[in-house]
Amino acid sequence: MSAEEQAADRDWAENELGKVAPGDARLTSRLVTLARSLARAPETSLPQALPKWSELKATYRFFDNAKAVAEHILSGHIEATCLRIRTVPIVT
């Protein structure tokens, strides 16, 4: 992956999920990192997408955290999608 692709990847994840408010900045950071990792291989299982045990364990701990609520996670994505929709005259 080129440096430009890596930068775009970071920007996408940060823009899409960086404003999520699960009540813990570390969880938001973990969510952004997780989204970047999973976006590189969306067709694979978690162990395949996250071959390092530490990353996989952190992911399982993230999903096990009571503050990692689906509504919070989706809120950033929904907000970013609405902003993108506003930039085009017609969504087809």
Image (cartoon, helix red, strand yellow):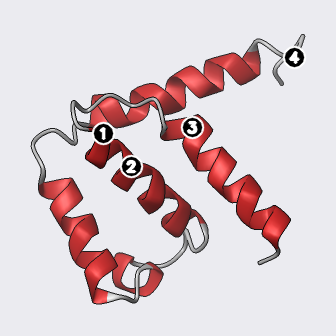
Q: Amino acid at mark 3?
A: Glu
Q: Secondary structure at mark 2?
A: helix
Q: CA distance from mark 4 to mark 2?
A: 30 Å
Tell me the distance, in whole angstroms, between the alpha carbons under discs 1 and 2: 6 Å
Few, some or many residues within 10 Å of mark 2 (<14, 14–19, 20+): some
Q: Secondary structure at mark 1?
A: helix
**Do labels 4 and 1 touch, CB within 8 Å?**
no
**Marker disc for residue 29:** 2
Q: Is residue 55 left or right of residue 50?
A: left
Q: Residue at x 57, y 37 (%)?
A: 16
The label number, if any, that marks residue 49 in the structure image: none
Q: Give me the residue at 33% from left, 76% from top.
A: 55
> Left of 82 or right of it: where is 33?
left
Q: Nearer the viewer, mark 4 or mark 2?
A: 2
Evaluate if marks 4 and 3 touch, with contact meaning CB atoms under 8 Å apart.
no
Q: Amino acid at mark 1?
A: Ala
The reply to whether discs 1 and 2 touch (Cβ–Cβ < 8 Å) is yes
- Disc 1 target residue: 25
Quickly name the residue at label 3. 16
Q: Quadrant of residue 72?
A: top left
Among numbered discs 4 and 2, the one appearing first in the sequence:
2
Question: Measured from the top left, where is residue 18 in percent x and y?
Answer: 48, 37
